[in-house]
Image (spheres, helix red, strand yellow):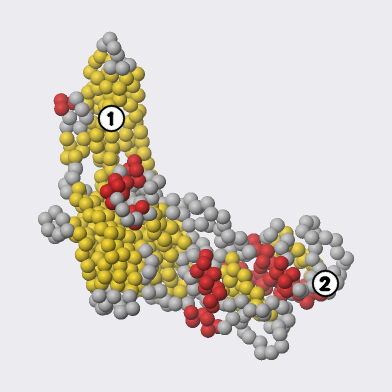
């Protein structure tokens, strides 16, 4: 048992050792009772799961924890603060307390003190169960006003989403996000297809073993949030994957040569390959949900394989909870306050990866679009984080330590209480801190971003969102399918067996942006963009007289951009263009306000 807190406060206590409940002489109106703080204190142990935003045939978010050790729950500390408030009780003979298994407080005290301990337990339970509620609606198609609009009144969003739900075009999730916790949702289904074959060769025998693969489609998201001034700051990673068209089947006919050193024969083969055609709308962003407004994330793709449009509607619902909660105990002015530091240092999305590094863009593109290489390379990795140093700075800046105050932080929570059970002589303060510090909870500054990829005069892809200044966000919209690219020749003695090889056909846009507003109101936006657009549907190239398998042939137009754009001051949307215009060129238009 760690009694460092009480030892530092030099409060006389009759403490029993951890173990079996000690034998104490009977005292009138005194009894043992156990208080379970493990059921009250939040578990601040879940670390953020990482996700690779590069589409790879509907790859999924990684919901596994990163393996970092979890934060301590602070159960023993809370138990000790409860005893501190009742210290006068323990100056009497026969009173004792102990913390068992770092989770439970056992106290041998009077009935009146038991009542106060119950009040404290109820206070902690209420304070630690405050949460932010965020509604996420994923709508197939575009909703809301046309043009550059990423924020609309909540009432208008309710009407738009209601009509989409009635038409069966929307899915809704309500997230309860507690400070320090991460809400996760996986609403997906698996599509299993035969995508390849293993060739086994043994002299005159040829066996093709089907290789099946599952492709996950549906909605996955992870989010952390904090209530800030006039709304909620939301850190979100989301992937919406859907089937763009029914799976495509290809029949491959070719002739193998099978034999040994004495004889050989032609053996025809006919294999059926199935290829998914999926589209992904993904985002990793830090955004602000103003009170009474909804934020729209708009994603669109127009490609030779089909068109896809998706609108994600984000809203904070319910009434905001107070930044701090407190309880007065006894008649001596002893008060406990609990402050949610996530209001002062909200969570955010951290986006990093090889795609954002300077140098050798050709190699990065290979890893970007070659399925065999991008796994594990993390070209564009995102996770939702709490910055421990920012929480510590928020604590030191707004709630400075002083001799008459005891402060302890675990996770985003800060508990404040007097260092003695009997306050010093002089005016009593209603709180352990100046209430004016609550005004330091700032409203995040947002930038509305509109990204339009044009191929010639046509819009090929688009992403629109409202993001928080100074934070990097990333977006993906792209369609994928599998195509037959080439063959490997498997040889056993005189036998030659053709083993078809696959490749991924990708059509879409991936962008990372980091906007910063300059003192004069201009916007400095770091932009990293990768686009790859199919010029036409893949053609089926047939081998010579069946001697070699056929293959899919296709051409793409690419865009690589790693630049900073400077948009002048103003309230209207301002734009910059990256890329090469003209016939067949790709242009990325970056607009903001």
Relative to 103, does residue 121 appear above or below in the rendering? below
Q: Confirm whether residue 297 shows in the render.
A: no
Where does the image place residue 273, in percent across and percent down from the top left? 28, 35
Where does the image place residue 154, in percent across and percent down from the top left? 36, 73
Q: Earlier in the sequence, mark 1 or mark 2?
A: 2
Identified at 61% across, 62% down, the residue is 73
Q: Nearer the viewer, residue 576 or 108?
A: 576
Identified at 39% across, 59% down, the residue is 351
Q: Confirm whether residue 42 shows in the render.
A: yes
Quarter holding residue 301:
bottom left
Q: On the rendered structure, is 267 left or right of 287?
A: left
**The N terminus - image quarter:** bottom right
- Count of numbered circles on the image: 2
Q: On the rendered structure, is 94 left or right of 49?
A: right
Q: Which mark is residue 416?
A: none
Tag 1's secondary structure?
strand
Identified at 71% across, 88% down, the residue is 425
Mark 2 Cα shell of 10 Å, populated few (<14), some (14-19), many (≥20) = few
Q: Residue furthest right?
A: 25
Identified at 63% across, 79% down, the residue is 402
Could you tell me how far apart the alpha carbons at marks 1 and 2 are, in whole angstroms?
86 Å
Residue where numbered disc 1 is placed:
488
Q: Nearer the viewer, residue 428 or 217?
A: 428
Where does the image place residue 518, in percent across and percent down from the top left? 33, 75
Mark 1 Cα shell of 10 Å, populated few (<14), some (14-19), many (≥20) = few
Tag 2's secondary structure?
loop
Q: Nearer the viewer, residue 406 or 212?
A: 406
């Amino acid at each position: 048992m760690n009694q460092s807190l009480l030892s530092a406060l030099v409060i006389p206590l009759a403490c029993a050792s951890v173990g079996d409940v000690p034998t104490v002489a009977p005292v009138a109106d005194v009894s043992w009772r156990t208080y379970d703080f493990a059921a009250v204190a939040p578990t601040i142990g879940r670390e953020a799961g990482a996700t690779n935003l590069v589409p790879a045939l509907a790859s999924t978010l990684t919901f596994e924890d990163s393996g970092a050790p979890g934060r301590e729950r602070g159960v023993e500390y809370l138990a000790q603060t409860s005893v501190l408030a009742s210290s006068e009780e323990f100056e009497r003979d026969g009173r004792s307390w102990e913390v068992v298994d770092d989770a439970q407080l056992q106290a041998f005290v009077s009935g009146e003190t038991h009542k106060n301990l119950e009040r404290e337990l109820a206070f902690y339970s209420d304070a630690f169960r405050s949460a932010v509620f965020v509604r996420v609606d994923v709508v197939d198609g575009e909703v809301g006003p046309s043009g550059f609009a990423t924020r609309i009144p909540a009432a208008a969003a309710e009407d738009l989403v209601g009509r989409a739900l009635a038409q069966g075009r929307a899915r809704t999730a309500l997230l309860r996000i507690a400070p320090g916790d991460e809400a996760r949702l996986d609403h997906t289904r698996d599509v299993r297809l035969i995508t390849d074959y293993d060739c086994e060769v043994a002299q005159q025998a040829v066996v093709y073993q089907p290789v099946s693969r599952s492709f996950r489609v549906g909605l996955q998201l992870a989010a952390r949030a904090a209530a800030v001034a006039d709304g909620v700051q939301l850190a979100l990673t989301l992937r919406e994957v859907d089937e763009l068209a029914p799976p495509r089947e290809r029949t491959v006919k070719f002739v193998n040569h099978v034999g040994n050193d004495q004889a050989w024969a032609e053996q025809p083969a006919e294999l059926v390959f199935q290829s998914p055609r999926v589209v992904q709308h993904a985002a990793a962003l830090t955004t602000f949900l103003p009170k009474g407004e909804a934020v729209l994330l708009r994603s669109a793709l127009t490609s030779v394989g089909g068109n896809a449009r998706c609108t994600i509607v984000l809203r904070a619902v319910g009434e905001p909870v107070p930044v701090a909660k407190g309880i007065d105990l006894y008649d001596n002015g002893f008060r406990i306050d609990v402050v949610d530091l996530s209001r002062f240092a909200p969570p955010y999305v951290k986006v990093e990866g090889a795609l954002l590094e300077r140098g050798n863009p050709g190699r990065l593109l290979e890893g970007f679009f070659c399925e065999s290489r991008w796994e594990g390379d993390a070209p564009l990795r995102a996770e939702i984080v709490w910055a421990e140093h920012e929480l510590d700075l928020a604590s030191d800046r707004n709630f400075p330590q002083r001799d008459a105050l005891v402060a302890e932080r675990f996770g985003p929570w800060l508990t404040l209480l007097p260092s003695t059970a009997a306050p010093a002589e002089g005016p009593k303060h209603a709180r352990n801190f100046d209430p004016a510090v609550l005004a330091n909870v700032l409203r995040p500054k947002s930038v509305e971003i509109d990204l339009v990829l044009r191929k010639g005069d046509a819009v090929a892809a688009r992403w629109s969102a409202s993001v928080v200044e100074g934070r990097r966000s990333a977006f993906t919209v792209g369609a994928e399918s599998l195509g037959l690219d080439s063959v490997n020749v498997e040889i056993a003695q005189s036998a030659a067996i053709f083993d078809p090889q696959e490749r991924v056909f990708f059509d879409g846009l991936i962008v990372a942006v980091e906007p910063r507003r300059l003192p004069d109101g201009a916007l400095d936006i770091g932009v990293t963009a990768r686009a790859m657009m199919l010029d036409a549907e893949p053609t089926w190239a047939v081998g010579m007289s069946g001697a070699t398998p056929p293959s899919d042939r296709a051409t793409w137009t690419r865009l690589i951009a790693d630049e900073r754009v400077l948009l002048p001051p103003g309230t209207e949307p301002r734009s910059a263009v990256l890329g090469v215009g003209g016939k067949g060129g790709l242009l990325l238009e970056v607009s903001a306000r």
